[in-house]
Image (cartoon, grey):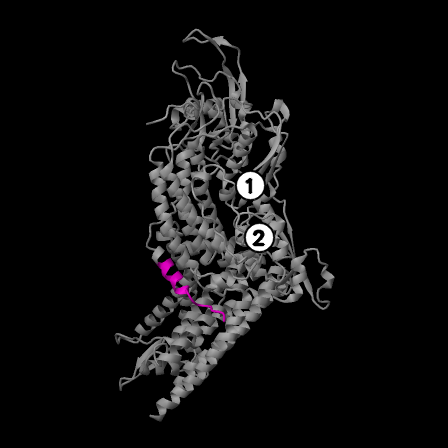
Amino acid sequence: MILDNPYLHALIVGLPLLAVALTVAGFGVFYERRFAAWIQLRRGPVWVGPQGIFQIVADALKMFQKEDLVPASADQAIFKLASWFPMFLALSLLAVVPMGAVEAEDGSWTAAWAVSSLDVGILWPLALGGLMVFPLWAAGWSSNNKYSLLSGMRMVAQGISYEIPMVLTAMVPVILAGSLSLDDIVTYQMNHGWFAVWPPGPGLVAFVIFFLTSLAEADRVPFDIPEAESEIVGGITIEYSGIRMGLFVLTEYAHTFVAAALTATLFLGGPHMPFSVGPAWMGVVWLLGKTLFLFFVIYWIRWTWLRYRADQLMDLAWRWLVPVSLGLVMLSAVWVQLMEGK
Amino acid sequence: MKHYLRGLHLALYETLRQGFKPRITQGMRSVEQHEERYRASFALTHNEHGEQACIACMQCSNVCPSHVIEVTAGPKEASPATGKKRGWAADYTLNLQACILCEMCVQVCPTDAIVMVKVQEKPGFSREDLVLTMDKLYANAKARPLAWANGSILREMQDPKREVKP
Amino acid sequence: MDPIFQPFRDDPHYPLDRYEAAADLMLLNMGPQHPSTHGVFRLKLVLDGEIIVKAVPYMGYLHRGVEKMVEGLTFAQMTPIFNKHDYVSPMTNEQAYAVAVETALGIEVPRRARYIRTILAEIQRIASHLLWLSTFTLDMGGVIGGGAAMMMYNFREREDIFDLFEAVTGSRFHYNTHCIGGQRHDLPEGWVQRVRAFLDRQERAFDEYLRLIRNDIFDLRTKGVGVMSADLALGLGITGPNLRASGVDFDMRRDAPFHAYDEVEVRVAVAQGCDAYARYEVRMAEMRESVRILRLLLDQLPEGPICGSKPVKMANAVRVPDGRGYTAIEGPRGEIGTWLIGGGEDKGAKPFRLKIRPPSLHAMAAMSYLLPGHTVSDVVVVLGSLDPIMGEVDR
């Protein structure tokens, strides 16, 4: 590779990645509004620019112009800090996702082009995803609002509970591929088939559970209990206004995008091209396509389902998802033994 | 045993299916469609001789539940067209700010003077914009399509001895 | 549910200090500005974590003093005032008032007018229940969530209903189409065919709604939530679908017929579940029943005059010189009662007293019985399932 210096590599690969992620997150608002309108027999935003594509610009301008209100009784420093951290955390999850595929001379494929190819790559997004709880809880607590407090408490309970099945199901690809590195996991899928499809039992169930838990981690319907606006009026964002509120909204979309990208990487082969074998940059397109498909499914679900109650959410996590994902880990271990035994 | 995920795929199917149905909202530049009997604002009419139809009998002012109609009666004079002595309204204002568009003034008007029109008043920037003065009311009758009902039509429709259609 | 909450459910005035001494209770004022309180309604909640120990409802934020105001209005002026009480079913509110004065004066309403009233009331019942369904799912699914999709589908049919009403009365919402003794507007040409077409569309739409909400999330959120026993419901004077969901087979359309309900068979929907799900079942069944009744009524619609008294020509055309009496009709939310004392000012042209008995007010009284032991999330489900309209509660 030309980029032997890891810092230079991270800069050159990471900056376009950040730009793409932020753009997608920003336009995610527009995509979602148009899609929701399509489902709901409405028209959606159609006036700003051709077919309303500049709606996000108008929204952002509005957000910037609004007064940055900090409640007098809020914990000022934490209140201000808490609005910035979720964005950093959500975007830094992307650092280990390999985006391209390189063909070797013997016809085998290797994943490449991650911002940082960590050997323990899978632990990075899981650990940082777990950290997401803290700034959100800090925002809920420092707002000095009872709805925000309830929301923060729900956020912590939900985030920690769903962390466990998420980590356990992420272990299934790890065991099957035999490596913690995301590069190796993707390389394995390129040569042996996607984990969502093969092995037929544990892979598919693990994919579904991982997808559900990442919905819960990103606070999406049907698990959007921490921000249930019909119960606790929007939760942690209730006291935020202006650009801080805008940051929370953008974080939501960024986090959803990142969760979709991670699911696509772990279970849908990442940049793997299933039908045609093209140049390496086509891998980026394929990864983006898979991510946007999951993104679409998340919003499809969001505008269709109702939401669970907090205790039912806990029940689902601890009574069903944790035991099932534990079983999946064992099953995949057995699978690996059987396949290697042959 | 509690179940969590049954039946949810049907909901997903339904929302996707609805996406292909015709839209139900109107864009802000589309024209409003209204029924034949739609009523929105008011107008004062002239009678068949071209005189003002209002005879200042005060029935509309009395029946208005919100008390928004103010009529000032002028002196009773003979009509130039028929020569009969009749009342004349010197001034007539209808304050749309508190009007509830209940159509009671139309119902009681003996000379079909006050009627409703099909086009709404435009939103204004001052309170005076929504006060329909006599001039505005007469202008409305000329400029806007009149609504279906007037006092005679309504009372004829409600007549207990109305002819039964075969 | 934890048995520690049972005394709080039995008696809303049970002292809080008999709850666990170690508990750290938090007071949360839900409303009057809250997206899911169906208007301006305030609930004082005492929370132990997320669980409600005590709930106190506060009404009156939308009080407009209508009952005092109408003492200064003549009977002919009042109909447009009364359709603003329950702003989700104005038609039945007008009818309740018109029936009250007609009963006091002994005016006989022509058969065609009674049929028109019944038809309008049943269409209004569908419209009202559609709005209930959309707000109920909005409470559970959120404005940015599945509830909003359901709401848009409901409002598509509700718009059709408004178009039908506009064709008759000229107004989309505050109709003023009833007068003492009959109707002010006759049905226009071709209206009956339009209603039939609408009913066909509506029947297909029911299946669409069911596909959206007949799933486990809806069941989990509604089953066993807000259990109201028949004794409690009868004791609080709760009527309508809320009462029938508690297993009491009572419907004034069948048991005390008014309008033209004595000429059609009304199959009353009753559910035994007593919870929010039972209330949903009853309302869905009622909508289907309304469609069936409407088809029968449209088939039998007679010709003839539409008003039994002389058309209103002046403000004090109707006088109730003396007498007093209570009349009630079954609205979409239950019994809309009118207690009328005649002989007011202007030789009886104005009422001495006119008291409205709104069904929603009685339903609100149940909140403090139903909520203890449930979580904050269930508040909106219980409130939504009772289908209150704050304009009617506070008047």
Task: From the image, state whether disc 1 or disc 2 is nearer to you.
Answer: 1
Q: Residue extending furthest top?
A: B83
Circle 2 SS class? loop
B2 drawn magenta = yes
- Residue at 61% across / 64% down in the picture? C50
| Callout 1 crowding tier (Cα within 10 Å): few <14, some 14–19, many ≥20 | many
| Residue C205 against residue B80 in the figure, above or below | below
- Residue at 53% across / 11% down in the picture? B75
- Foreground of the two, A91 or C19: C19
- Foreground of the two, A132 or A79: A132
Q: Are marks 1 and 2 on the same chain?
A: yes
Query: What numbered label is drawn on residue C34?
Result: 2
> Mark 2 is on which residue type?
His
The span picked out in magenta is B1-16
> Mark 1 is on which residue type?
Ile
Residue B31 coordinates in the image, percent (x, y): 36, 39
Residue C10 coordinates in the image, percent (x, y): 66, 58
Residue A96 visible here = yes
Looking at the image, tell me whether mark 1 or mark 2 is earlier in sequence order. Answer: 2
Give the residue number, with chain letter if any, for mark 1.
Answer: C336
- Residue at 40% across / 46% down in the picture? C291
A235 drawn magenta = no
Residue B36 coordinates in the image, percent (x, y): 37, 33
- Foreground of the two, C184 or A87: C184
Residue C108 coordinates in the image, percent (x, y): 49, 29
- Label 1 lies in what chain? C
